[in-house]
Image: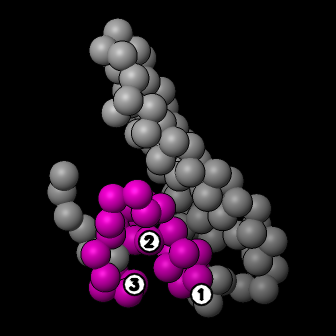
């Protein structure tokens, strides 16, 4: 598995942690949301709160799917891989929405 460092805290992103990618690179979920909160206007805080809840849910779902993928029968692994890609895409889209605030 590839190793990444969080561009906010400079610590390694470990397997099983919630993280995402932005144009600046890999970032822990909590670092991303905290940094964004310090940068945005007060009028956008509620949008950030809602989108961060969505992203948190998507990232947790990715971790859950990874657990199933490792333990599932071979016949299911391709279907699970496809579902993972779908959720990964959704998380990427949510990350872009947060980045654009």
Residue picked out by circle 3: 8
State how far apart marks 1 and 2 are (Cα): 17 Å
Please say whether residue 26 is visible from this viewpoint. yes
The answer to whether 24 is drawn above or below residue 96 in the figure is below
What's the distance in space between the residues labelled 2 and 3, CA to CA?
A: 8 Å
Count the marks. Answer: 3
In magenta stretch: residue 28: yes
The residue nearer to you, when weighing 98 against 11, is 11
Query: Of callouts 1 and 2, which one flags the residue occurring earlier in the amino acid sequence?
Result: 2
Q: Nearer the viewer, mark 3 or mark 1?
A: 3
The foreground one among 73 and 36 is: 73
Query: Which residue is identified by label 2?
Result: 28
Q: CA distance from mark 3 to mark 1?
A: 13 Å
Residue 7 location (% of width, % of height): 33, 80
Q: Of marks 3 and 1, which one's residue comes earlier in the chain?
A: 3
Q: Residues within 10 Å of mark 3 (few under 14, many from 20)?
A: some
> According to the image, label 1 marks what residue?
39
Establish if 87 lies above or below 92: above
Residue 89 visible in the snapshot = no
Q: Is residue 33 magenta?
A: yes
Q: Position of residue 6 (x, y in %)?
A: 34, 76
The residue stretch that appears in magenta: 7-36
Q: Nearer the viewer, mark 1 or mark 2?
A: 2
Give how far across and how far down residue 57 sits, in percent. Answer: 64, 51
Q: Are marks 2 and 3 in contact (CB under 8 Å)?
A: yes
The residue closer to the viewer here, 2 or 50, is: 2
Q: Quadrant of the C terminus?
A: bottom right
Residue located 34% across and 33% down the image: 70
Q: Residue at x 43, y 63 (%)?
A: 17
């Amino acid at each position: 598995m590839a190793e990444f460092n969080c561009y906010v805290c400079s610590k390694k992103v470990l397997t099983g942690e919630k993280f995402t990618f932005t144009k600046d690179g890999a970032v822990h979920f909590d670092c991303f949301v905290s940094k964004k909160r310090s940068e945005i206007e007060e009028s956008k805080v509620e949008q950030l709160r809602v989108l961060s809840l969505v992203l948190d849910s998507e990232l947790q779902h990715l971790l859950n799917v990874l657990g199933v993928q490792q333990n599932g029968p071979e016949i299911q692994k391709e279907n699970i891989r496809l579902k993972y890609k779908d959720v990964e895409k959704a998380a990427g889209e949510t990350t872009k929405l947060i980045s654009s605030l």
